[in-house]
Amino acid sequence: MEEPSDNRQKKVVAVVGGGLVGALNACFFAKRGLDVEVFESREDIRQAKVVKGRSINLALSHRGRQALKHVGMEEKIVSQGIPMHARMIHSLNGKQSPIPYGKKSQVNRLPATYKLTNHSETYPNAKLNFDHKLQDWNGTKEHIQADLIVGCDGAFSAIRKQFLRRSRFNYSQTYIPHGYMELTMPPINGEFAMKPNYLHIWPRNTFMMIALPNLDKTFTCTLFMPFDEFEKITTGDQVIEFFQKCFPDSIPLIGADALREDYFRLPAQAMVSVKCSPYHIGDKCVLMGDAAHAVVPFYGQGMNAGFEDCIVFDEIMEQFNEDLAAVLAEYSRVRVPDDHAIADLAMYNYVEMRAHVNSKWFLFRKHVDNI
Ligand code: FAD
């Protein structure tokens, strides 16, 4: 627990959404000495059972690490992850070829929300409210007074919906034709089924499967594929047929029976790119993380950009002595162009990947460089 940084008049901040960015933001605001209340619609993930197909492995890059470092959480989170030294490309014939990462690239599986939530609770001025869903900010069921509302409620943000009612708010969203599905590769005799410390990749023209190791010795495999291809597969036999054709070496590792079932456990998930501006309303409300800029995952920077939002905001708070009207305007001015650039890069990678339908796997290297 750290003491508030100075004696400025205590403001009350309501953070809506206790995901990765909300949990980190709670740490930033609490460290600054403000009274923070986090409202998260889901139950406390620390008490929840893991939901299959919704885990998402994340690559933590430099910009994300800097933000974690600022609240003393970099090492705690990185040490819980699994370092990646290289990518491992799986060819159709089962051949595996490693491609080392540059020095900076290291990928970790993050139980980060859990850790950040724990950390935010060490501040006496932070209060976490789970099973609290923001319906409307004039909601009737419970009334909260706050100096600042911070929308960290993800790609389908309820806070952002309130912005849409206002004049001169720019907004666009694009769903891409690809979806993604997560499958689990269990351990074999208590050990990883494939070499850990690698990002495993099966590049197959318009399809791609990747696998990242988890601390429990499983791998989470993520299959990226156009929705109309997902929809063509309607029976367990068709799943096996498809995997035989595209990812034959993965079948004995995932298990044919598990594949037949897991493919149908949850529908493929959509991927949306959201751009908006400005990110604030007056001195009262600001958007961060996916609520401000959901990006497609082909650049591996969504969470990292959200973490960077937190540190940039904190720096501006310092610069403008917590004068919220000035801080929020400056935050939009500085942050909108950077976040839009990341959204564009992610979409560019996706579009280019689709354009190279008939090219060989090494063309994918640049697209997966940042995953
Ligand atoms: P979220 O994680 O969506 O959290 C939002 C929270 O708000 C949730 O807990 C939700 O329950 C809560 N909430 C929603 N509505 C309400 C409401 N009305 N009231 C209260 N609470 C509410 N990023 C990377 O940096 N590296 C990667 O390698 C990477 N890989 C990815 C792979 C895939 C397949 C996908 C889909 C994304 C990937 N990303 C990656 C992006 C990353 O997952 C997101 O950018 C990140 O999760 C955003 O965090 P967030 O806290 O802004 O939003």
Image (spheres, rainbow, N blue to C red):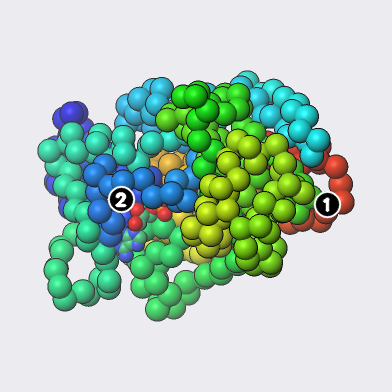
Quadrant of the rendered image containing residue 283:
bottom left
| Residue at horizontal 19 percent and vertical 53 percent from the top | 129
Classify 58 as above or below 132.
Answer: above
User: Ligand 1 closer than 8 Å to the CB at disc 2?
Assistant: yes
What type is the residue that disc 2 sits on?
A: Gly
Label 2: few (<14), some (14–19) or many (≥20) C-alpha neighbours in 10 Å: many
**Quick one: 186 or 268, which is closer to the camera?**
186
Q: Report if residue 26 is visible in the image.
A: no
Judging depth in this view, the residue of 30 and 92 nearest the camera is 92
347 sits to left or right of 33: right
Q: For numbered disc 2, what is the local secondary structure?
A: loop
The residue carrying mark 2 is: 18
Distance Cα–Cα, label 1 vs label 2: 38 Å
Q: Return the x and y of residue 92 as percentages of the image width and height.
A: 79, 39
Quadrant, the N terminus: top left
Q: Is residue 74 left or right of residue 131?
A: right
**Closer to the observer: label 1 or label 2?**
1
Of residues 254 and 195, the one drawn nearer to the viewer in this rendering: 254
Q: Report x, y in % for residue 61.
A: 53, 33
In this rendering, the answer to whether 263 lies above or below 203 is below
The tag on residue 356 is: 1
> Callout 1, which amino acid?
His
